[in-house]
């Protein structure tokens, strides 16, 4: 069943940058882009690299290992060598916290 979990305080979200968060046994990447918050899985779908160590430009996160890029809004893989999208979570802001919907 789907449920919402809070993963960090809103004021811990970096501005136009990415940070890594562990919550409910998940390794997550949290992005702040132009005042909006986006959350995806943190481990790249291509290999053992953490996207929170990558480079965020606008809505695109570049993996630090082979420079594959994902759109943080949808998790869509945008270029080689990626062949698989990354999971992007529904996000809501409530009580000064960032929540994601998981199942
Ligand atoms: Fe991310 Fe290869 S591990 S692009």
Image (cartoon, rainbow, N blue to C red):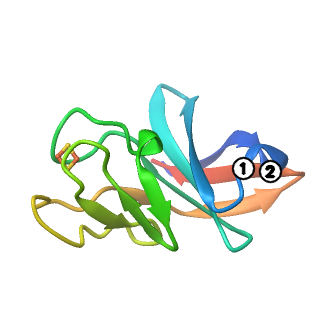
Coordinates of residue 7 in the picture (x, y in percent): 66, 39
Q: Residue at x 47, y 25 (%)?
A: 25
The picture places residue 28, in percent across and down from the top left corner, at 48, 41
As drawn, which residue projects farthest toward the right?
95
At horizontal 40% and vertical 42% (from top left) the residue drawn is: 42
Q: Quadrant of residue 71?
A: bottom left
Asked if labels 2 and 1 touch by Cβ distance under 8 angstroms, the answer is: yes
Residue 46: x, y in percent? 15, 46
Query: How many badges with numbers are in the image?
Result: 2
- Secondary structure of residue under mark 2: helix
Dot 1 crowding, Cα within 10 Å, few <14, some 14–19, many 20+: many
Residue furthest to the top: 25
Of 94 and 20, which appears nearest the observer? 20
Per the image, label 1 sits on a secondary structure element best described as loop
Give the mark toward the camera: 1 or 2.
Answer: 1
Question: Can you tell which mark lies on residue 13?
Answer: 1
Q: Residue at x 23, y 42 (%)?
A: 65
């Amino acid at each position: 069943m789907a449920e919402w979990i809070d993963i960090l305080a809103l004021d811990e979200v970096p501005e136009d940058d990415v940070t890594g968060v562990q919550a409910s046994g998940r390794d997550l990447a949290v992005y702040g882009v132009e005042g909006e918050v986006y959350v995806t899985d943190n481990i790249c779908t291509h290999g053992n690299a953490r996207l929170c160590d990558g480079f965020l430009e606008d809505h695109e996160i570049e993996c630090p290992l082979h420079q594959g890029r994902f759109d943080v809004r949808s998790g869509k893989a945008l270029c080689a060598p990626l062949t698989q999208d990354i999971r992007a979570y529904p996000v809501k802001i409530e009580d000064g916290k960032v929540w994601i919907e998981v199942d």
